[in-house]
Image: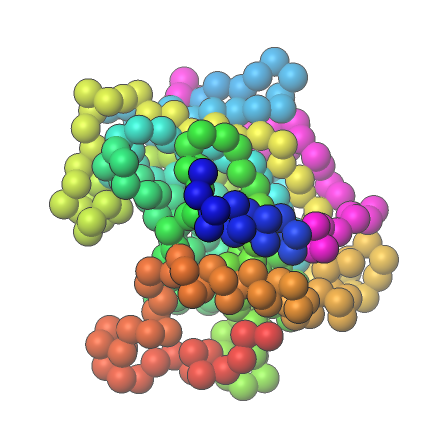
Amino acid sequence: MTKHYCRVTVFIGFLIASLIQNSQSSVVSVGDFNKDFYVTWSPNHVNTSADGRTRSLILDKDSGAGFASNEMFLFGEIDMQIKLVPGHSAGTVVAFYLTSDQPNRDEIDFEFLGNVAGKPYILQTNIFVDGFDNREERINLWFDPTKDFHTYSILWNLHQIVFMVDWVPFRVYRNHADKGVAFPRWQPMSIKISLWNGESWATHGGRDKIDWSKGPFVASFGNYKIDACIWRGNARFCRADSTSNWWNKDRYSTLTWPQRRLFKWVRMHHLIYDYCQDNQRFQNNLPKECSLPKY
């Protein structure tokens, strides 16, 4: 282990220690897949432990698989521990996301794009608002996500959406609705997770296909926490400033100073694509949010 790696690890660990919060009474669940989720497709490609605490999805030539939450939510924080497909995972996609499943859907996406053996996983994030996306960002992870479980989190409130890996914030999408930027704030969303064949685009633009001789491909999930407002038909309850809706309080309206340091570190060393830097794609007319502050 190099001295540089040690310094980075200590630096991240020190900052994370100052970020982890104590959850309040809004915790919906801390972990039984059999109670909180249902299988959406290919149940014979889903394996769940007897106690419901861990679940794995399998992709082979026949099918991938997926599952979704029983409830829908409007604002909160979702933490999911994931161990990704090891080895040669080119063409595979593991998705962990929130979606409203409407024609004009809102969606907050983690997509883990497999790669050829020895090359890093790419984590792509995207945000749909009123059915429109084109907000992709990509990072290389600074660890091997196939060796152990890591925590991937979405904090979604009235002020911002924060994507985190092991409590390290690497993407922020602020609510600039007052400046004409669309922000997901009205549609409740369910949690969805899937493993599927994305070889047409996922790895090097589709050049590297799935090598089925390396399969079956397995991704594992566990130790999740849903700390969010359950949708009961009235947005007022989820938007209210209450003890249970801790995520809407001022202290969560922007990144803290330690979070900003981590955020800048990821952006400097691990960001490989940002739609806000793609002038060619948008013909020198970048989306409005690209010129607005992130915190």
User: Residue 220's spot in the image, x, y percent?
Assistant: 48, 28
Q: Is residue 151 visible?
A: yes
Along the viewing direction, whichever of 130 and 180 lies nearer the viewer:
180
The magenta stretch spans which residues? 17-45
Q: Is residue 207 magenta?
A: no
Along the viewing direction, whichever of 113 and 258 lies nearer the viewer:
258
Q: Image check: 87 left or right of 141?
A: left
Q: Residue at x 65, y 27 (%)?
A: 32
User: Residue 58's spot in the image, x, y percent?
Assistant: 38, 24
Q: Image check: 32 left or right of 127?
A: right
How many numbered discs sit on the rendered protein?
0
Q: Is residue 43 magenta?
A: yes
Q: Residue furthest top?
A: 50
Q: Residue at x 20, y 24 (%)?
A: 212
Along the viewing direction, whichever of 46 and 100 lies nearer the viewer:
46
* Quadrant in the picture for residue 233: bottom right
Reply above or below: 237 against 26: below
Reply above or below: 28 against 240: above
Reply above or below: 270 against 115: below
Along the viewing direction, whichever of 123 and 19 lies nearer the viewer:
19
Q: Residue at x 25, y 33 (%)?
A: 117
Q: Residue furthest front?
A: 3
Which image quadrant: the C terminus?
A: bottom right
User: Residue 267's spot in the image, x, y percent?
Assistant: 44, 64
Q: Residue furthest left?
A: 207
Q: Residue at x 59, y 48 (%)?
A: 10
Snapshot colouring: rainbow
Q: Image check: 269 left or right of 29?
A: left
Which image quadrant: the N terminus?
A: top left
* Quadrant in the picture for residue 269: bottom left
User: Residue 193's spot in the image, x, y percent?
Assistant: 47, 38
Q: Is residue 74 visible?
A: no
